[in-house]
Image (cartoon, rainbow, N blue to C red):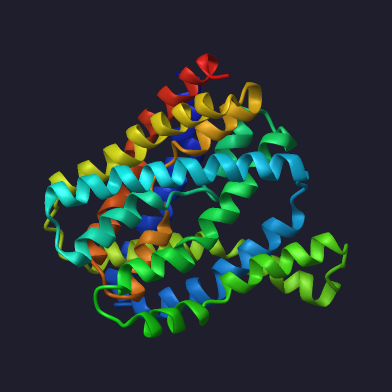
Amino acid sequence: MTTLLHILTHNVIPLTIMIGLGMLLQRAFKLDIKTLSKLNFYLFSPGVAFVMLYNSSLSFEVILEVLLFFSIFFIALIVVVEIVVRLRRYRPGMRSAMRNSVLFYNSANYAIPLNQLVFVNDPFTLSIQIIIMMMQNLIPNTYGVYSVNAHKQTLRQTLRTIASLPTIYVIPFVILLRVFDIPVPEPIWIPLNYIASGFIVTALVTLGVQLGSMNWSLRLADVLLSNALRLCVSPLLGFLVVLLLGIQGTTAQALVLSCAVPTSLSSVLLAVEFDNEPEFASQVVFASTLFSVFTVTIVIYLLQYVG
């Protein structure tokens, strides 16, 4: 019960308040959702990726183990989602929206504080989550952009769109800075910290603005299907991959927990920026965040049987 209340008060309620403020602002002022989306894609997302990756301490062995786990897990999740969308016979736009709602999960502003709550500020498990966050930051800006545009753009146009996104350059750039131990000058580091601090607020307000401006014709079956895949099937797959690879102990627990978090705001930002089922994407993020207080608590309880 204590864990449930902590997750509720430290994750779900704060997120919901920020989303609610975005909805109120939209009702009062009719904000431009496209401008907010571009701020997220071209300023706040690359900023937070830079700061978090630069500040993390990662060993080569942990990186390889986590990347192997993530690759197998992600491919398995793609296969499951692909089977579902084909059985449901979705049209192309809805196929990509459903894929993104399951494949892209909240590995930063939800999973990182959750990781540190469960593992009591353990820097080792934080490093594991940072690697997952890095991959979950990179994939929406590459595969995610391709997914929402493949049915309406040529491959060259889609690749041009991907090449225009700064996050895909930020990640290898930060890795080079870390490898060669290059310090970031203070006049640059200070504004980068300001930008990173603004990511969560801007992303959540953007979601609220989208929710406040959409027609609430709830697509209950599709939303619940996405939530079930994200919150229930995903951690189960994570557990199976951990067993397959023989990963044990705290590493195994941290990896399974990383798979259990709700749908990422990236799916909403992609949907809004490229006009691909934005109402469905917004409803999925909102619902999965609320339902996660129950499903994540169950996963935390079951971690004692992992590893």
Above or below, 18 relative to 32: above
Can you say which quadrant of the picture contains the C terminus?
top right
Q: In terms of depth relative to the viewer, which is nearer, 24 or 2? A: 2
Residue 196 at x, y = what percent? Answer: 63, 64
Q: In terms of depth relative to the viewer, which is nearer, 102 or 10? A: 102
Q: In terms of depth relative to the viewer, which is nearer, 234 or 290? A: 234
Left or right: 22, with 283 as reference point: right
Image point 34% across, 34% down: which residue?
Answer: 233
Above or below, 159 relative to 101: below
Image point 45% across, 62% down: which residue?
Answer: 140
Q: Can residue 18 be seen from the camera position used here?
A: yes
Residue 290 at x, y = what percent? Answer: 34, 40
Residue 139 at x, y = what percent? Answer: 49, 60
Image point 82% across, 77% down: which residue?
Answer: 187
Left or right: 194, with 182 as reference point: left
- Taking the view exactly as shown, the residue that stands out farthest to the top is 305
Left or right: 17, with 247 as reference point: left
Residue 130 at x, y = what percent? Answer: 64, 48
What is the quadrant of residue 48 in the picture? bottom right
How many circles with numbers are drawn on the protein?
Answer: 0
Image point 28% across, 42% down: which residue?
Answer: 227
